[in-house]
Image: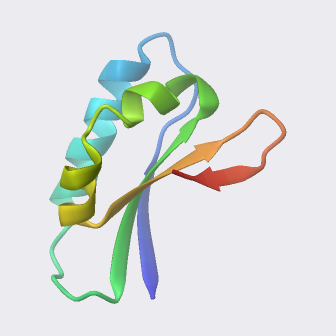
Amino acid sequence: MRLICEAKGTTSVPGLDCDTAYGQLLRRMSDPTREIQYAVVVPSSALKAALRVPQRVRDLLRVAVYEVRDDFTVVMH
């Protein structure tokens, strides 16, 4: 499996940055095979914004959301 991610850091406008991350990731979706998975990776402070895209839509697009916590642990949502 191959994982293609768009990662964003802590910013003052997490909603806009998450929207940008999704757009950048969508442009990279050129291979329809199931061997490639996609993800948006955000800090805890931007998790709520990243989860604004409904789960059903993320499932259809095969996009996971990963949260990077302050202690650098990573959690898939």
At horizontal 44% and vertical 82% (from top left) the residue drawn is 2
Measured from the top left, where is residue 32 in percent x and y? 15, 82
- Extreme-front residue of the structure: 56
At horizontal 15% and vertical 74% (from top left) the residue drawn is 30
Q: Is 68 situated above or below 19? A: below
- Extreme-right residue of the structure: 71
The N terminus, quarter of image: bottom left
- Extreme-top residue of the structure: 12
At horizontal 22% and vertical 88% (from top left) the residue drawn is 33
Which picture quadrant has residue 76? bottom right
Q: Is 27 situated above or below 4? A: above
Q: In this figure, which colouring scheme has been used for the structure?
A: rainbow
**Lateral position of residue 36 relative to residue 42, left or right:** left
Q: Is 69 situated above or below 25? A: above
Measured from the top left, where is residue 5 in percent x and y? 43, 59
Q: Nearer the viewer, residue 59 or 45?
A: 59
Q: Nearer the viewer, residue 28 or 43?
A: 43
**Lateral position of residue 21 relative to residue 43, left or right:** left
Q: Is 61 situated above or below 35? A: above
Q: Nearer the viewer, residue 75 or 5?
A: 75
Measured from the top left, where is residue 31 in percent x and y? 18, 81
